[in-house]
Structures are given as C-alpha cells and as structure tokens.
Image (cartoon, rainbow, N blue to C red):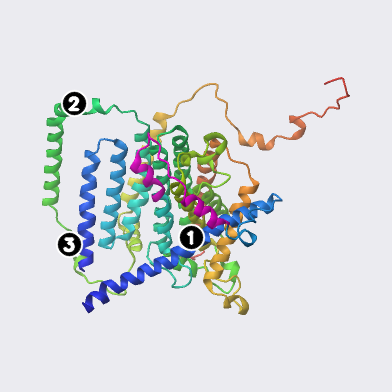
Amino acid sequence: MVEFWDLYALPTIIIVAKILAIVLPLLVFMAYLTLYERKVMAAMQLRKGPNVVGFYGLLQPFADGAKLFFKETVIPSGANKILFLVAPMITFLLSLIAWAVIPFDEGMVLSDINVGVLYLFAISSLGVYGIIVAGWASNSRYPFLGALRSAAQMVSYEVSIGFVIISVLLCVGSLNLTDIVLAQRSELGIFGWFFIPLFPMFIVFFISILAETNRHPFDLPEAEAELVAGYQTEYSAMAFALFFLGEYVNMILMSAICVILFLGGWLPPVDIAPFNWIPGIIWFGIKIALLLFVFIWVRATLPRYRYDQLMRLGWKVFLPLTLFWVVATAGFLVAFDMVPA
Amino acid sequence: MIIATLAFYLFAALTVASAFMVIASRNPVHSVLFLILAFFNSAALFILLGAEFIAMILIVVYVGAVAVLFLFVVMMLDINFAELRQGFLQYLPVGALIGLILMVELILVVGGWHLSPDALKVVAAPITEASKLTNTEQLGGLLYTQYVYLFQAAGMILLVAMIGAIVLTHRKRPGVKKQVIADQVYRRPEEAMVVRKVEPGQGV
C-alpha cells in the first residue's frame, strides 16, 4: 500500500496540481486578454470600451462567460452531431496541452522534454483540425468555405514557421526550450537575445503567428463581410465559447513561443540589481503582454488581406526568405566557427 | 514498470482498433479521422520506446500535413456510397489475393531479418552517462555522416516528384490578369491621376 502511494498516487496528485496551477491562471489571463483587447481597441478608436460591469469594467469577461454558459447550444439538424461537438473540444484541448512544455522560469516547467520545440510545432500544426472538422460537420456553406481557407492558410504559414524555428535551433544547438532561453543569457542583457541577430526571422515569425492564429489582418477564415463568421457560423453558447477560449489561449501560447525563441523567455532585460529582483515569471508575463498588445494594435490598424495576397506572402515571400536565412545562418556559424556544441 | 506495460497495451489496442475502423467506417471523412487516431497512438508507442524525435516527426509530418491534405480531398469528394458497396463481392478475390501476397512478403522479409554485427554491438553496449546523446543528435549524426548519400538521394527523389506533380498540373490559361506587385509599388501619383479644377456648374 505504501509502495502504491509513493510510486503512483502521490506523483499523480502532484502532476494534477501542477496542471491546475498552469491552466487556472492561464484561463484568468485569457479572460482579461479579452478585456485588454477591448480596452486597447477602444483607446485607439477614441472610445471608452466596457466600463459598466465592475470597477473600470473589470468584471466584464466573467459577465460574458456567464452569458455564454447559460445560453442554449443549438445543433443544426443537418450537422454531423458527434464531430460538430468534438471540433470545439479539439481546439480548446490543443490550446491547453501545449503549455505542458513552456518554461515559465528556470526549472518551472511541467515537462522538460528534449524535443520541446518539436512538440510545440506538432501541437500548433494540429490546430487546423478543430477548424476543418467544425466547417465540415456544420454541413453548411459558409463554415465549409471558411474551414477550407483556414486549412490552406495554416498549412502555408507553418512551413515558414518551421524554417524560422530551425534558424533559432542552429544558434542554440538543442531542441529543449529551457536550453533555448539559457542560450540567450549573457552579460549583454537585452542585446544578447535572438531578436537582434535574427531580426528578419523575428518579424517573419510574428507575422506568421498572426496568420497561424487567424488574427487580423489574416482573419480570412471568419471574414464577416464575406463568410458571415466562417467556420463558427453555426456554433452557439458553450461550443462557441470553447472556440473563443481556444483562439485566445492560442494567441497567448504563440506569443509565449515567440518570447522564448526571440525575446529571452524569463530573462530580465538588464541583469543588474532592480531588474533581477523581479521573478522571471513576471518578466515572461510582461513580454507576452507586450506581444499581445502588438496583436491588438495590428487588429485596430490594418485592413484584411485578400486571399491571393495572403498565399503570395506565405509562399513567394516568406518561404524563400526563411529558406535563405537558414542557409545563411548555418554558413555564418560554420565560417566563424560558432557552431554550438 | 506496470504503468508502462498497461500504457503499451492501451495504445497498441487503440492503434489496431482505429486502423480497423479506417477500412470499416462507411464515411470516408470518419476514415481519415480514424487514421489520424492511429497515427497518434503509434506516436505514443514511439514515445514509450524512448524515440521521442520520431514520435514528434510522425505527428508533424503525417498528422499535421499529410492527413490534412487527405481530409481536404476527401471532404470535397462526392461519393455515392451505395454504388461503392455494390462491387464488394466482385473485387473480394483480387483484394484477398493482393493482401495475401503482401503478408507473405512481409513474413519472408521479417523472417530473414539479421541485425548487422555493428548494430548488435550497439544494442549490447550499456548506455553510459558520457555517451548519453539525445535522440535528435544521434539520428542527425547517423544521417549526415554514414548515410549522407542515401539521405541526399531520398531528397532528390522527393524534389523530382514535387516538380513532376507541378509540371503535370500546371496549365497556362490565356487572358488571365495577374497582379504584378512590383508595378504597383513603382506607380507614382503623377502617372496615375490628374488633378483638375472643376468650375461650379460646368462639369469636367
């Protein structure tokens, strides 16, 4: 009995506690991301944004959540019931399981695996299934068109994301996310982070994650002027809420990956007294919030891309550029004998 | 240990069951989704073996790219299911024959399998702390040194196949207007528009 407790029960309880410690704050962060988005957009458009529910609108996300929770889930009669309900769950689950390998601080990670980057890449490449299954199972024209667009879009931008990740890996020499952050630690502080030597890749990566999360200006899958609401047209209540949660958690996740790859993860910008007193997880959060601000800023500023322009940007601009940069990075590292062991 | 064994049987059973459902389900979209489930469970089996790199590549390549294309194609097919099931008995002997031949071939290959002496030595040698390279490094070392020519040949074959597919499907349609981005960027306001002063009541 004691053996059973030590070997199986206790580790299970610890892992479940760790998972809850990641997921619950994440969902609260996500709830406030919606408020953040509405407030920032409002400020950019000279409005006030939500300011009625709670002090300064702080309870607005929970009011929205409660509203969605108490609504009726409508399933269209022509829909494939099981797949129709499975699709939002896939989206939501995939957005959460990726956090298993994200290091929030040194050693503060649920599972410190050797192939962390590949795991994240695999999970983000699965995101397309939630959308495509939703579009097909709805058995309706607009969702299906939205799903097809989104599948093509996500597959195209994944290729350049892959090359960007390779160019970072070349500079690190490891696929472990903790190693990637530690490789950016130096006495230079902020100037040692990878976004300086790999600046074009940082920009390409950021634009690609906009496309990967179906955000403006690449939100063609749900272009409301053409496709009503794209793949989520037929969804209501909690099923819709799961899509919504999944999308926003995915935004945070992609920003987190970008921070780890290019902005030094949990490292402080300058490694001197007042800055390195602040715990790493706070720095990590601040950097993510900064990138999320750019997400919202882009949404408030740019018009939507046309579909053929989107494909052109992915295949004819980003793919050759990133491919060239991978070769250039490898050549540079070999020529100056800087290949990491 | 017992957990690993139980996990193995769980994933193995799920792999076999979902592989069976791929051929048994009537709806081709369900078939592809079961195929994806089978891929996932085989990736889990690879992880149980400690081959995490191969597991991740299996998911990235097969589930993330190949199966998406399958799903893409299958969703757009307009299949008449009644017609599809009509010829089942007629094609059964041919199908069974091909299946039998494949099975015999597999048995012959696996039955006559010998590990090379080098590989046997590697298997027998204990993993020491000093030689504890990660999966990725070991695979990379092997692929880019010992098997570099074969690796490059495989790459060339894929490239030829890719170019071939593009050549076969590419067609030039006359009279299609294409967007030339460079022309648009180089356009100046002076060549594109004229500013006229319009007097009231006179028009242009």
Disc nearer the start of the sequence (3/2): 2
State yes or no: discs 1 and 3 in contact (Cβ < 8 Å).
Answer: no
* Among the 4 quarters of the image, the one containing residue A197: bottom right
Three-letter amino acid code at the position of disc 1: Leu
Amino acid type at circle 3 is Pro
User: What number is the disc on residue A27?
Assistant: 1
The C terminus of chain A, quarter of image? bottom left
In x, y percent, where is residue A135?
Answer: 42, 39
Kindly report the distance in space between the C-alpha atoms of the residues bearing marks 3 and 2: 50 Å
Residue that mark 3 sits on = B117
Residue A261 percent across, percent down from the top left: 50, 61
Say if mark 3 contacts mark 2, CB within 8 Å: no
The 10 Å Cα crowd at callout 3, few under 14, some 14 to 19, many 20 or more, is few
Q: Amino acid at mark 2?
A: Gly
Secondary structure at badge 1 equals helix
Residue A258 shows in this picture: no
Chain label for disc 1: A
Chain letter of mark 3 equals B
